Amino acid sequence: MDQKQDHTNTILAQLESTESLNSMDVAKSLAINHQDLVGYLLQLESANYIKTEGLKQDQLILTEEGNTILNSQSGEYEIYQKIPDQGISMADLQKLFGIEQVAKVKQEQGEKKEKQAEDPKKKQFDLGFGNAKKMGYIKMDKGVISKVGNDLPDKIKLELQQFNNIKLGSAQVKLLIERKLAMISTIKYFDIKKGIRYSSKFREQFAALTTEQLLSGEWKDCDYKSINLKAEGEKISMGNLHPLLKVRKQFSQILIGLGFEEMPTNQFVESSFWNFDALFQPQKHPARDAHDTFFCSDPEYSEEVDTQLRDKVKTMHQSGGVGSIGYQYEWSHEEARKNILRTHTTAVSSKMLYRIAQQYKEKGYFPKKYFSIDKVFRNETLDATHLAEFHQIEGVVIDKNASLGQLMGIIREFFRQIGINKLWFKPTYNPYTEPSMEIYGYHPILKKKVEIGNSGVFRPEMLAPLGIPEDVNVIAWGLGLERPTMIYYDIRDIRTMVGPEVKVETVRSNAFCVFESK
Ligand code: PHE
């Protein structure tokens, strides 16, 4: 039988004739430390052989100093012993303790006198000297220190030798603690009683019933571990959707539900033409500045677009059409060909409108609803709410009957489905829409209105050059993806959601579900 089994059975045997055991006594009798005993107790308890109750007890233990004294002698006594029978001066006594020298050395180095008091040897000596006087070991007369009596015992050491008999709570204990020779420490131990399956011999418990045990009938004599139905299953390590992806997915599902089709957005680099010019955004517009837009250096210019289209856009900018006088400036091809990182998904919409117009030429008119969700780039200063790359969601409705009222209706329905019911529209200016409306929603956490999107009816100056017939209206709106995600997932700093500071664990532990709409 191995030692472990031995110990286990000894514990059980000790419990046979008594109602309860103290774990400290058991550890002592097995000559093992208490911590090791706890291991055996846990095993016995889980098999219901024993029941334990955790108890605490205060115990007086010697401090390091107390132990040192017990093993040699007290400082007071050392001083007493070093004093010769004829007496000694303070300076000489200190010398015997190696103090004077230290003080001198320090003085030579120009240190202040007070420093001597900080010398630990001196401090120790002063303490012992004071105590030795108080305890009546020594006396001082006209500068001469002498012993009282000749063979006094080391009282402190004697007291510490009696340490085990000192009762907690006595005045003696208080003194020992005050003198930092002893301290109280709380020890934890167990009261051990018989458990419901107690037996004086421990039998191995099987974790599972085997076919062999069943066939041989052996199972009748076997003990089995009980099944812990409350045990938690092992954590499954799995990936999860990033909050942005969840919101993105939900938005696209809503839009698909409303009959929108997704536009292809797989092109981050776009020519200024589709991002700005085709949207009737003048070439001197501040948004086209390097402060707001990332320009590409290689390749710096995009390929030329269809020259007919290019010329129509050019004429619209320079001198207008469809009742407009345009911007009255010299439009530059070169400027329009500059490659940039798209600054909004409306660059995708303008290209799509051109394609639709091409199809109209073959198939004739048909209404269409499109949406896109993808990355856009702006040369922003990064902070808790701004990144240089973020996502936009854009919806476009191409319909002869499309109106401002319909636009407001679609926007209301879209936001209703993501749980934002209170909306406000505020007139604004966009070069490509007229009328244009900023969309404000009620922020449930900030408890105030916040801007959540921009919208409008595309201008004839934009639609006509693309080839969209005059009687076809196009309404559109756009919003950011990050802001609603931050609101719904209570993310305070955008940088914890996107970029190099995102913790994989945050994504992993993210709730599986998407936020609920009312
Ligand atoms: N492109 C606009 C923006 O970036 C949003 C918008 C889209 C406005 C469509 C009107 C129509 O804010």
Image (cartoon, rainbow, N blue to C red):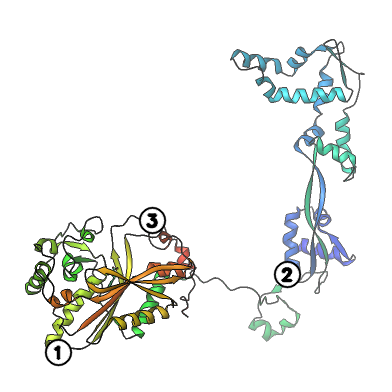
Where residue 363 is drawn, which disc sits there? 1
Q: Quadrant of the N terminus?
A: bottom right
Where residue 46 is drawn, which disc sits there? 2
* Mark pair 2, 3: CA separation: 55 Å
The reply to whether discs 1 and 2 touch (Cβ–Cβ < 8 Å) is no
**Amino acid carrying mark 3 in the image:** Asp
Q: Quadrant of residue 87?
A: top right
Query: Where is residue 347 shown, x and y percent of the image?
Result: 22, 70
Query: Where is residue 288 shown, x and y percent of the image?
Result: 21, 60
Give the class, few, some or many, for how many residues have Cα within 10 Å of label 2's Cα (few <14, many ≥20).
few
SS category of the residue bearing label 3: loop
Foreground residue, 350 or 149? 350
Look at discs 2 and 3 and give the one toward the viewer.
3
Write the residue at 72% across / 22% down: 122
Mark sitting earlier along the chain (1/2): 2
Foreground residue, 154 or 170? 170
Look at discs 1 and 2 and give the one toward the viewer.
1
Q: Quadrant of residue 179?
A: top right
Q: Quadrant of residue 184?
A: top right
Relative horizontal placement of residue 389, taking residue 60 as reference (left or right): left
Q: Which residue is mark 3?
A: 383
**Amino acid carrying mark 1 in the image:** Lys
Mark sitting earlier along the chain (3/1): 1
Foreground residue, 206 or 467? 467
* Mark pair 3, 1: CA separation: 49 Å
Write the residue at 26% across / 58% down: 292
Whether residue 242 is situated above or below residue 102 in the rendered picture: below
Tell me if the residue at label 1 has its CB under 8 Å from ligand 1.
no
**Amino acid carrying mark 2 in the image:** Ser
Foreground residue, 232 or 465? 465
